Image: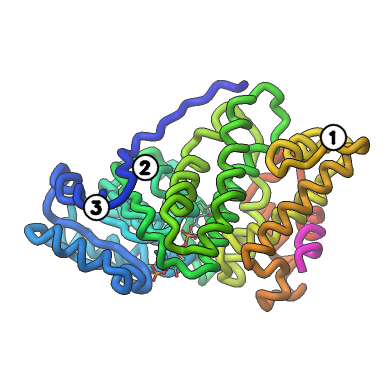
Amino acid sequence: MKNFNFHASTEMFFGKNQIENLPNILNKYGKNVLLTFGGGSIKRNGIYNKIYELLNDFNIVELSGIEPNPRIGTVRAGVELCRKNQIDVILAVGGGSTIDCSKVIGAGYYYDGDTWDLIKDKTKIDKVLPIVTILTLAATGSEMNRNAVISNPETNEKLGTSGENMIPVASILDPEYTYTLPAIQTAAGTADIMSHVIENYFGEEKDCFIQDKFSEGILKTCIKYAPIALNEPNNYEARANLMWASSMALNGLCKGGKTHGWTCHPIEHELSAFYDITHGVGLAIVTPNWMRYILSDKTVDKFAEYAINVWGVEPCEDKFETATKGINFTEEFFKKCGIPMNLGKLGIDDMLLEKMAKAVVTHRDLSKSYVPLNENDVLNILKMCL
Ligand code: NZQ
Ligand code: ZN
């Protein structure tokens, strides 16, 4: 196991009615609050009204309309609002897009240049306004991590950045807030959680047993509870387990001690950059194809382990058969969750595949991935996804 630092400092308020703690949480930072949210789901499900009821002695300024795949223009508008209104704390209410956008607004507040610099170069991120989140979608883990992903539609770029000070100071996770999710967002969110774990699970280290057991537990949680949440959207137990899985999958728990870079996320980010697709849907399509592409003598043992421990596959005499069953189960699971499982179904053809493959290797060094890939490998995987 390699050396690592684990820093997950967010205070998590998990469970029913935890929103009642909101005034106390915010009072630590000040009375001027920037309330950020997306396209209006929080108005339809009552969270918005509840916030105003609880925060009647705070000054609230709003930034609404944060896009799925949040855009740099929205970040810039948020920075302006913070400066104009001397904001003390940002309250991000929504999924990963709202939270990510808010993190970079918080960093941009203290940065003199253009905020896109903070996306291109994470070392420029220094101080950040305190970020408090109310999570409404189990998916990205942004509620408990240091990352943010922002899109620049002018340049067709969607890039991740990160900074220790962007870790939310507190997050409220009430599973009931996820009851109103459209089925496709529940499914896509589950695929995202699973991908965060899978990106780390497949590595060469043989002695990260504890990380692998955390990972298998999170994957089995998703496999057990996503179908229940899809059939019964108001099932508290299912929503609660998925929500906690979201936070645990990407707060460093499964990654610490492992060294390999990610592969499916860099590929998916280009699909989202060029076609503005839902992140988790792109991952569900890319992941089984990537698995098939890298299955070899070198990786077969790990894939067989995955098939047996995660999907309950009976070991076959031929390791490749065992491994392939695990990959097929992965694909079938996403399909059963209702995710369209090829790019054609999203209206994506082969027009920009080469451009996207080039962009993947320009933005990420895939030579450090579990199985090192070059531009041509990425192109082959994208073709398999069509
Ligand atoms: O905008 P509203 O109206 O709120 O609707 C949203 C949006 O349309 C809706 N939604 C959210 N909660 C809801 C709800 N609808 C009804 N009821 C609720 N309770 O869901 C839609 C998608 O929301 P979004 O925030 O975009 O989804 P998600 O949480 O999946 O975030 C995706 C973004 O996060 C980035 C992705 O690339 C993408 O930009 N990621 C961030 C990461 C991180 N910070 O660590 C890591 C991830 O790998 C990922 O890259
Ligand atoms: Zn993700």
Magenta stretch in the rendered image: 380-386
Tell me the tag on residue 19.
3
Q: Which residue is mark 2?
A: 167
Q: Nearer the viewer, residue 323 or 287?
A: 323
Q: Quadrant of residue 311?
A: top right
Q: CA gap, disc 3 to disc 1?
A: 49 Å
* Marked residue nearer the N-terminal end (3 or 1): 3
Mark 2: secondary structure: loop
Task: Please say if 79 is above or below 148.
Answer: below
What residue is rendered at 65% in x and 37% in y?
Answer: 201
Instruction: Give above or below for 169 relative to 351.
Output: above
What is the CA distance from the residue labelled 1 to the residue labelled 2?
37 Å
Q: Which residue is mark 1?
A: 298
Q: Is residue 286 magenta?
A: no
Depth check, mark 3 against mark 1: the one in front is 3
Q: Is residue 114 visible?
A: no
- In the picture, the quarter occupied by the C terminus is bottom right
